[in-house]
Image (cartoon, rainbow, N blue to C red):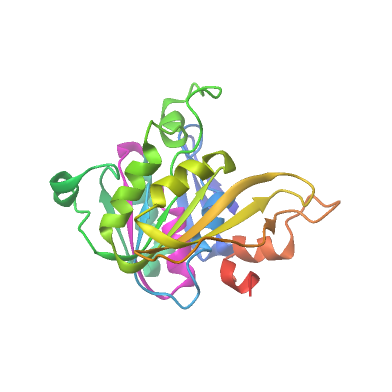
Amino acid sequence: MNKTKNYSDETIDAFHRGKFYLVQPRLCGHRSGMDAMLLASLVPNNFKGKVVDLGAGAGAVGLAVAARCLDVHVTLVERSAFMVSYAQKTLMLKQNENLSKRVCLLKADVTLKGRSRLEAGLVDNAFDFAIMNPPFNNPVDRKTPDEKKFEAHVMPESMFDDWLRSAAAIVKPGGYLGLIARPQSLTDILCALEGRFGNICVIPIHARTEKAAIRVLFYAKRGSRAALSLLRPLVIHEDGCHIFSPKIDAINNGHISLWELLK
């Protein structure tokens, strides 16, 4: 990510070496970075179909997928009016003109159930792939004074079950799910996936080889009963270096999906 312009309350940031741009809040709320690019990399290069980005913020993950996968249509779903305004600005950027033709924005709460969810526009069996970066800070952690950032980062009770229930409803049977979270949430996520998604692949993300994982990626198939697989980890920095490893740099810049690295 490269910052291109800096206004009093927002920035316009280049991603994938200028393949798309985001309008993001400068001083408050959520700003996207590496987590978004790692999550987007779960969608294979040759994927075709409808992708939904749940809790999309300004649209980083969805646009990263659209920039790399030319045969997808992306729906950005965000409930915060504050972040929806930034997603709208993002889609209106001249630099995103071509991508925006394959991206739409829906203001809706991912946790809605039944008829309320349908009326909000989250229709059953509508998508081929759901991607999500839900809030994953524990409420007992140090609370930020930024209310908008708190809303974006702190998980409410039963959050994973609520989000994955909705994902299971709107993803077609045989469709896919991609999720990024902290390792502390592993048990809650696996419990929420049970009976909804199977063939689960778990990919740990380490800052360095000798350090514990700092993030976990999940990839799963709707309705599958196949067993869970623990795949080899990704390491962000090579030993003794502060720069990104070549593999992570390739993901950050949209050159490859995660699956090219794991072959």
**Picture quarter containing residue 16?**
bottom right
Q: Is residue 122 above or below residue 45?
A: above
Q: Examine the rendering and report whether any part of residue 171 can be seen.
A: yes
**Outermost residue to the right:** 240
Q: Is residue 147 above or below residue 175?
A: above
Q: Residue at x 42, y 67 (%)?
A: 66
- Of the 4 image quadrants, the one containing the C terminus is bottom right
Residue 49: x, y in percent?
34, 73
The residue closer to the viewer here, 235 or 79, is 235
How many numbered circles are shown? 0
Residue 70: x, y in percent?
42, 76
Q: Residue at x 60, y 47 (%)?
A: 215
Q: Is residue 118 above or below residue 66?
A: above
Q: Is residue 150 above or below residue 238?
A: above
Residue 148: x, y in percent?
41, 30
The residue closer to the viewer here, 2 or 77, is 77
Q: Residue at x 69, y 65 (%)?
A: 247
Residue 32: x, y in percent?
51, 47
Q: Residue at x 39, y 67 (%)?
A: 99
- Of the 4 image quadrants, the one containing the N terminus is bottom right
Membership of 39 in magenta stretch = no
The magenta stretch is: 58-82
Q: Examine the rendering and report whether any part of residue 56 can be seen.
A: no
Membership of 78 in magenta stretch = yes
